Image (spheres, rainbow, N blue to C red):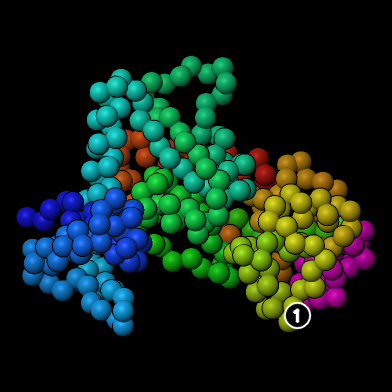
Amino acid sequence: MLEVRRLRVLAEFAAQGTVTATARALHLTGPAVSQQLAALEKETGLTLLQKRGRTLRLTSAGQRLVDHAHVVLGNLAAAESELAALQRGERGTVRIAAFASAARTLIPRLWPEPHAPQDPRTPSLHVIECDPDNAELALRQHHIDIAVTHSYSLLPRPLPAGCEQRSLGHEPVYLVLHPADATNHGLDPGAAADLARFADTPWLLPGPDTACHEMTQRACGAAGFVPRPVAVASDFTVLAALAARRAGVALIPRLALPIPAPDVSIHPLKTPVHRSIHALYRGGTGQHPDTRHVLDGLTAATSTYERESSTY
């Protein structure tokens, strides 16, 4: 029989990458972590870790056990939180991390209308805004329960080990520019834009450390040019506002467009680019009633938003 505490140490090692960091995260000593990992290897009869230079790495057997450990630990955490809430007579709490435009447009819809009666079965929510990379890290480290992330058709994002996901939908990426610039390029309202025609145009780019920045670079690269930035901002509403002042053009996903939009012209791309929205959760936790309730709420919120933004 495998001991849960040793599985927890192995899963934490997979997340932290070193014995020292694992010990710090679990408030143990380094030797204690090493002893637990050695005891787990003895229990399984398999080599779970191997040295590569001066570092330890998971073997294929170790990674397989980590995947199972995530499911076991996720179920235990869900059971513990639900039982604790029942003992206190409280609702459960679901912790969510979401990227900025999802936090602005989707997450608020998880709360009921201000004057609607409260359902005692509805879990309370704790929300933080962060980019997909940090959301995935927080999920792996058990700091949150659901990570709302995105990936682009030009920039796929692999599913993290030990996690499952629910697809919340796909949205187009639009070219956003001033109406006068659209007219100068012969673009009728709503007409598809050929990015190659904007090679010499000033560009408004997302922050350089974001997937959105890389998406713009790849889309322009596929059209045969490198965009010339005149402004860089991680907030898409800033880029839309600058486009409304005729500062340049930008690629903006539908979810990130401000509503109502400023005085801009919005165009699909002749070579389409899409952004996919995902809700990630640790394996085995998706059937917990509170988690499932929030996942269903996110699915409904996305559908409602798509209907409301169908004019784009």
Q: Would you name the residue on which mark 1 appears?
A: 225
User: Can see residue 205?
Assistant: yes
Residue 261 vs residue 25, the one in the foreground: 25
Q: Residue shown at 53%/47% (left/top)?
A: 98
Q: Residue shown at 36%/49% (left/top)?
A: 142
* Relative side of 218 to 264, left or right: left
- The three-letter code of the residue at mark 1 reads Phe
**Number of numbered discs on residues:** 1
Q: Which residues are magenta?
A: 180-203
- Percent position of residue 199, x then y: 81, 76
* Relative side of 222 to 33, left or right: right
- What is the crowding at mark 1: few (fewer than 14 residues within 10 Å), some, or many (at least 20)? some
- Percent position of residue 249, x then y: 81, 63
Position of 309 relative to 236 (above/below): above
* Relative side of 247 to 123, left or right: right
Residue 60 vs residue 248, the one in the foreground: 60
Position of 277 relative to 305 (above/below): below
Residue 259 vs residue 235, the one in the foreground: 235
Q: Residue shown at 41%/45% (left/top)?
A: 144
- Percent position of residue 106, x then y: 57, 41
User: Can see residue 68?
Assistant: no
Q: Quadrant of the N terminus?
A: bottom left
Q: Residue shown at 36%/26% (left/top)?
A: 91
- Percent position of residue 256, x then y: 67, 50
The answer to which image quadrant residue 66 occupies is bottom left
Q: Secondary structure at mark 1?
A: loop
The answer to which image quadrant residue 52 occupies is bottom left
Q: Is residue 300 magenta?
A: no
Q: Is residue 188 magenta?
A: yes
